[in-house]
Amino acid sequence: MSAIFLKRFLQRPFQVASIIPSSRTLIRRVADKMDLTKPRVIVEYGPGEGCHTREIVRRMHPDSQMILFELDPELAEHLGEQFRDDPRVTVLNADCATLATVLAEHGHAHCDYIVSGIPFSILEPAKKRALLRSTFDVLAPHAGAAFIIYQVTNELVAHCRHFSRIESQYCLQNLPPMFVTKFYKTANGSAHGTATSNGKNGQPVNGHSRH
Ligand SMILES: C[S@@+](CC[C@H](N)C(=O)[O-])C[C@H]1O[C@@H](n2cnc3c(N)ncnc32)[C@H](O)[C@@H]1O
């Protein structure tokens, strides 16, 4: 799995921004930040070759939906093949900045969790601000809904003041070590909160589409 990742890194070093995928420990730490026992709408920015996706999909409820935004066409194609037989997963070769429009097109008013692996720290400031704003806006307005990122530095915290609460932990068992940070939309968000899948009218969402 990591051969394709290295190949794409060599082609697009600033976009892919890492030579090897996340470690097993980091993957578990990120997945542990979500309550996946109930139906959820989950979005992932920059899944790469899919190491976090596989763990989330393995844990998630049968009525959950997961939408992947991967900018690199080869990685997106590779993801499409991996999840071809899982109707809960939608793979898009698209910029995650299009999230709000795409969610609406797929019939979702909000999502419960957004997991991000994209290199936020090298985004141009205006793009970073706009993406953080739309990330906040599309999260469901109830406890537990959260934006979860893993990054080498924790610089994003300074740009996320509009989130109500922030929890951070350092994961040494990754190359390089990473901060795993969870940004809660609402002040009463808890580790596993009470978020429910929230398609239109707050109902669980079962539909899916594939691109
Ligand atoms: C550091 S890699 C993370 C890969 C994987 N999540 C992991 O943990 O190993 C970043 C990924 O984000 C993708 N990416 C970068 N900017 C993006 C954007 N604006 N929208 C969607 N994907 C993006 C890159 O193509 C790359 O696959």
Image: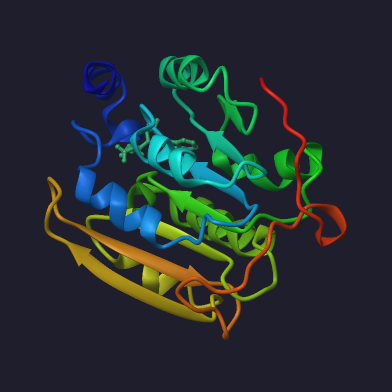
What residue do we see at 30% from left, 47% from top? 27
Task: From this view, report whether residue 80 is shown above or below residue 130.
Answer: above
Q: Is residue 178 left or right of residue 209?
A: left
Colour setup of the view: rainbow
Out of 111 and 7, give the one closest to the viewer: 111
Q: Nearer the viewer, residue 57 or 18?
A: 57
Q: Is residue 40 above or below residue 161?
A: above
Quadrant hosting ligand 1: top left
Instruction: Using residue 118 as the reference point, say whether residue 176 is left or right of it.
Output: left
Q: Where is 117 relative to 54, above or below? A: below
Which residue is drawn at the image coordinates 77% and 35% (left, top)? Answer: 207
> Image quadrant of residue 55?
top left
Q: Percent position (x, y) of residue 137?
A: 67, 63
Is 20 above or below relative to 111?
above
Residue at (59, 66) in percent of width and height: 145
Q: Is residue 46 visible?
A: no
